[in-house]
Image (tube, grey):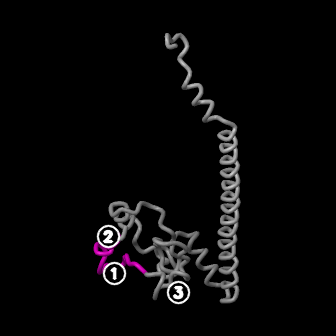
Amino acid sequence: MKPDWDKLMGEFAGSATQLVADVDCTADGKSLCETVGVRGYPSIKWGDPSDLQDYQGGRDFDALKKFADENLKPVCSPKNLDLCDYEKKAQISKYQSMSDEDLAASIAAEEKKLDDAEAEFKAEVQKLQDKYSSLSTEKDEKIAAVKAAGLGLMKAVKNSKPAAGSDEL
């Protein structure tokens, strides 16, 4: 993916309204990655810099370029209200009228919902993994029991007998 990403960065280099860049989340960019919610590598984020979204599309150059051409443009935000529909303008106005403390509390509450969803997902995946391990062990034990009961020897004996209707003595 890196060569395609580097090519895409070159395509958008110098753009006044579109940024395609990479950040090393293991070094100097670690705090930025934590701020925007990068949880795995490589991650692609897009959109308003204060509200980046996870990219879910293809990872080859053509898919990345098509997505960038269609989506990397100024979007509705507090700094681009002229691009907002009535509902988004009302939502932005509501948030702007909140005190800093109330806004921070609302953000924290929504982020907690995200964290809770992630924790629930991980817990359920662990349950599935535990169940898979249990079923795999159970299956292996059953297979071992069948083999120990003589299945292989039964097959060998069957194959050593002359075929029915054969003239072999």
Residue 16 is tagged as: 1
When the figure is inspected, residue 55 is found, relative to residue 132, above or below; the finding is below
State which quadrant residue 156 falls in: top right
Q: Amino acid at mark 2?
A: Pro
In screen coordinates, is 74 left or right of 116? left
Question: What residue is shown at x 51% (from left), y 12% (from top)?
Answer: 166
In screen coordinates, is 164 left or right of 8? right
Residue placed under numbered mark 2 in the picture:
3
What kind of element bears circle 1?
loop
Q: Position of residue 28 (x, y in %)?
A: 46, 88
Q: Position of residue 73 (x, y in %)?
A: 40, 72
Mark 3: few, some, or many residues within 10 Å (few <14, many ≥20)?
A: few
What kind of element bears circle 2?
helix
Question: What residue is shown at x 67% (from left), y 75% (from top)?
Answer: 110
Q: Position of residue 143 (x, y in %)?
A: 66, 43
Residue placed under numbered mark 3 in the picture:
31
What kind of element bears circle 3?
helix
How far is the residue under mark 1 from the one under mark 2?
A: 23 Å
When the figure is inspected, residue 134 is found, relative to residue 158, above or below; the finding is below
Q: Earlier in the sequence, mark 3 or mark 1?
A: 1
How far is the residue under mark 3 from the one under mark 1?
A: 25 Å
Q: Residue furthest front?
A: 169
Q: Which residues are magenta?
A: 5-23
Q: Earlier in the sequence, mark 3 or mark 2?
A: 2
Question: What residue is shown at x 68% (from left), y 57% (from top)?
Answer: 128
Q: Amino acid at mark 3?
A: Ser
Mark 1: few, some, or many residues within 10 Å (few <14, many ≥20)?
A: few
Q: Position of residue 51 (x, y in %)?
A: 53, 76
From the viewer's side, name the closer residue of 71 and 74: 71
Q: Amino acid at mark 1?
A: Ala
Question: What residue is shown at x 29% (from left), y 81% (from top)?
Answer: 14
